[in-house]
Image (tube, helix red, strand yellow):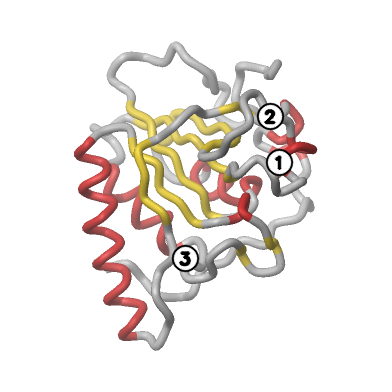
Amino acid sequence: MPITNRHFVTGNPIAPPFPEHLQQALFGLGCFWGAERKFWQYPNIFSTAVGYTGGYTPNLTYDELCTGLTGHNEVVKVIYDPALTSYTELLKLFWESHNPTQGMRQGNDIGTQYRSGIYTFTQEQFDEALVSRQHYQERLIQAGFKLITTEILPAGEFYYAEDYHQQYLAKEPMGYCGLGGLGVTFD
């Protein structure tokens, strides 16, 4: 997929190579426009990009994704410096920014591409994601909410979304965003 390799907000690259000291995280929390904005607005984030993961069709397009037949999820890739921002902080932002109890949807956005997911690049990320899910589940139960449906899996192939999707809400500030949390803090 041809993309502009310059983040519209940060000015940093959205595709590799990245400086060696940086790490990446991958999250699905509904429509990727709002999800990406949540992460690029977070302090000390180097770069973000939106794309697709977790499905069957290689090199898919947004039109193919919307058929519901590819199995992919809309995700945001977050590039960060672990000396400035921890993976724990990113997980906290993830949990608090959406409703992880809805299965294959977020609000009015319905389909497999809107499912909640954490896709990990290391065993440490995987283990930390599992612990964070258990912790947030306890917080949700205390607040009267249902069980978390978030999938936690090793990261598969990431396909960049079309260029017009990258940093969409910075380019179109009045654009659609149905993302919303439950009002339950992680801490």
Q: Residue at x 43, y 35 (%)?
A: 45
Q: Please name the amino acid that badge 3 sits on.
A: Pro
Q: Nearer the viewer, mark 3 or mark 1?
A: 1
Q: Residues within 10 Å of mark 3 (few under 14, many from 20)?
A: many
Real-space CA distance between mark 3 and mark 2, rounded to the nearest whole angstrom: 25 Å
Image: 23 above or below 136: above
Task: Give the class, few, some or many, for how many residues have Cα within 10 Å of label 1's Cα (few <14, many ≥20).
Answer: many
Compared with residue 124, is residue 109 higher up or lower down, i.e. above or below? below
**Residue 127 location, x and y as percent?**
21, 47
First-in-chain label (3 vs 1):
1
Q: Is residue 144 above or below residue 97?
A: below
From mark 2 to mark 1, how far is it between C-alphas?
A: 7 Å
The image shows residue 37 at horizontal and vertical percentages of 58, 46
Name the disc covering residue 100, or none: 3
Numbered disc 2: secondary structure: loop
Q: CB atoms at circles 2 and 1 under 8 Å apart? A: yes
Query: Dot 2 corresponds to which residue?
Result: 60
Badge 1 amino acid: Leu
Kindly identify which residue carries mark 1. 65
Nearer to me, 136 or 176:
136
Depth order, front residue of 71/91: 71
Disc 3 to disc 2: CB gap under 8 Å: no
The answer to the question of whether label 3 and label 1 lie on touching residues, with beta carbons closer than 8 A, is no
> Which quadrant, please, contains the N terminus?
top right
Q: Is 35 situated left or right of 137 in this image?
A: right
Looking at the rendered image, the disc whose residue lies closer to the viewer, 3 or 2, is 2
Q: Label 3's element? A: loop
Secondary structure at numbered mark 1 = helix
Q: Please provide percent x and percent y for residue 144.
A: 40, 88
